[in-house]
Image (spheres, helix red, strand yellow):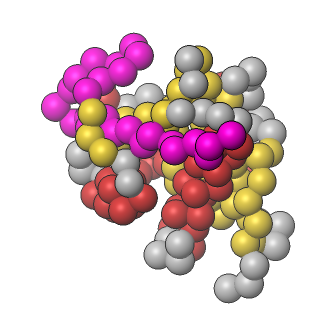
Amino acid sequence: MGPVSIHVEPADQSDVDRLLQLSDAVAARLYPGEYRKPITGKVLDSAGIEVFVARLKDKAIGCVACFELGDGAVELKRLIVDPDHQGQGIGRALVCAMLEACRRRDIRTVVLEVGIRNIEARQLYEKLGFRNRGAFGNYQPTPVATFMQYDLVLPIR
């Protein structure tokens, strides 16, 4: 496969939009319309949001967004890996890169919402140490949503 690089990149670019469209297509297959919220790179291109992009050579093969929530917390949102590159550890690498960046910024908690039918994503989050929790922020419980949390252990200073 070759070396994959992961970096924070501008959200408002065609590579990110293509990946977000893949994410929306997955959601459309798994969930009824009322529970889906399509998103674009332009929407993600704002203060307090970082987008981590995995690239193989010059091709974007995955991304995940990190939303600043304040009070030492962020929300992980829109993890997606191009179907041609799934099963190769790209999703795990993206989440780990985001968690490490959060740790360096003294973020204490990472939260997320994941649909109950997105079994692969749930399994990844569980393997990485995320645990179930209740709804957070503006989210309301729904029949298709699960909420998870990862508590970062900060090094002793």
Q: Is residue 43 above or below residue 114?
A: above
Residue 48 is situated, as x and y percent measured from the top left of the image, at 69, 23
Q: Does residue 1 belong to the magenta stretch? A: no
| Occupied quadrant, residue 93 | bottom right
- Image quadrant occupied by the N terminus: bottom right
Give the magenta part as a residue range.
Answer: 134-157
How many numbered tags mark residues here? 0
Residue 127 horizontal/vertical position (percent): 36, 62
The quarter in which the C terminus is drawn is top right
Residue ID at (55%, 54%) = 95
- The residue nearer to you, when weighing 81 against 38, is 81
Instruction: Please name the predominant secondary structure of the magenta segment in the image.
Output: loop
Which residue is found at the position 41% from the left and 16% from the top?
Answer: 137
Q: Quadrant of residue 85?
A: bottom right
From what the image shows, is residue 90 above or below residue 40?
A: below
Residue 79 coordinates in the image, percent (x, y): 52, 49
